[in-house]
Amino acid sequence: MSDSTSRVALVSGGSRGIGRATVRALARDGFDVAFCYRSDDDAARDLEKSGQEFGVRVVGTRADVADGAAVRGWIEATEDRLGPIDAAVTAAGITRDNPLVLMDDEQWRQVIDTNLDGVYHVCRAVVFGMMKRRRGAIVNISSVAGVYGHRTQTNYSASKAGIIGFSRALAKETGRSGIRVNAVAPGFIETDMVAEMNDKARKEALASIPLGRMGTAHEVADMVAYLASDRAAYVTGAVLQIDGGITI
Ligand code: NAP
């Protein structure tokens, strides 16, 4: 059961990977959870079943985080159906890798629109309500690429670095209103996103991870659930890395 009185959590990009594991971790901790996704209806319907498993409500909605109006509509409908939002997690993210010399405008735009504008749209839509209630926790999923940069990922690294600056600025703006804002920066985590890597890149990545393996979505979700809970009541503006030591 939850150690907090918070009841409603929001997860963007919740149908697969880290977002999916986060939906389940928050449901396990006693939150009713609303998540959004872009296209995979089957994955969303399957995940909604975790509501019965944990005795809470889990509701998936198709909404593209790059579309501000769609995000506002999703969040208004969630508040009507489940009540005010106590915790928001932004996990929706994509990659469109290419060395900068070969990158086209669309690859740049899609990544910034989804990863960075997506965080803005979700946080903008929840922050006023949280300020009024003087309570809220926001967890934005960044990446070690946003801290250190990753070759062939100027677009992705810029979006994830942007999330860190955004989170710290918002933590300063809203701390006195009882809101905590933190970022989580994962290294290589076994999800569909990483499954796209070729064998050579995977071998190189594994060789550089002191713990000798990639992380799991559950391990990231547990850190997110901690930051969303009252156990992290004195943590704000933090960027928690979860990367098997790859950045040592
Ligand atoms: P994933 O397995 O590819 O899942 C991405 C999720 O985001 C899916 O549920 C997808 O829904 C949703 N999504 C994508 N674009 C969206 C959009 N425009 N609007 C709404 N939902 C959208 O990715 P992941 O590996 O779990 O990554 C989750 C987050 O962690 C991302 O922000 C990623 O950058 C970050 N991260 C991942 C790693 C890693 O190694 N995996 C490392 C560092 C950071 P649909 O299936 O419906 O498209």
Image (cartoon, rainbow, N blue to C red):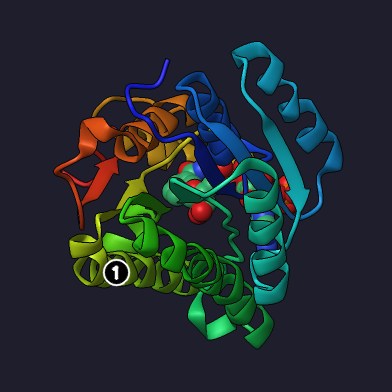
Residue drawn at x 14%, y 43% as measured from the top left: 234
Image position of 197 with respect to 156: above or below: above
- Residue 129 vs 192, above or below: the answer is below
Element at label 1: helix
Q: Position of residue 145 (x, y in %)?
A: 36, 59
- Residue 128 occupies quadrant: bottom left
Instruction: Tell me the residue at 65%/71% (across/down).
Output: 66
Decide which of 120, 201 is in the foreground and name it. 120
Q: Which quarter of the image is occupied by the C terminus?
A: top left
Quarter assignment of residue 163? bottom left
Q: Is residue 81 above or below residue 210?
A: below
Instruction: Say left or right for 73 vs 178.
Output: right
Label 1 beta carbon within 8 A of ligand 1: no
Residue 185 x %, y %: 33, 49
Q: Residue at x 60, y 59 (%)?
A: 94
Amino acid beneath label 1: Leu
User: What residue is at 66 percent from the left and 60 percent from the top?
Assistant: 76
Judging depth in this view, the residue of 58 and 20 nearest the camera is: 58
Name the one closer to the observer, 205 or 128: 128
Q: Badge 1: how crowded within 10 Å, few (<14), some, or many (20+)?
A: many
Given the current orientation, which residue lies at the most extreme right position?
Answer: 42
Would you say 148 lies left or right of 214 here? left
How far from the left and from the top, in percent, is residue 209? 29, 35
Which residue is the site of mark 1?
170
Q: Is residue 7 visible?
A: yes
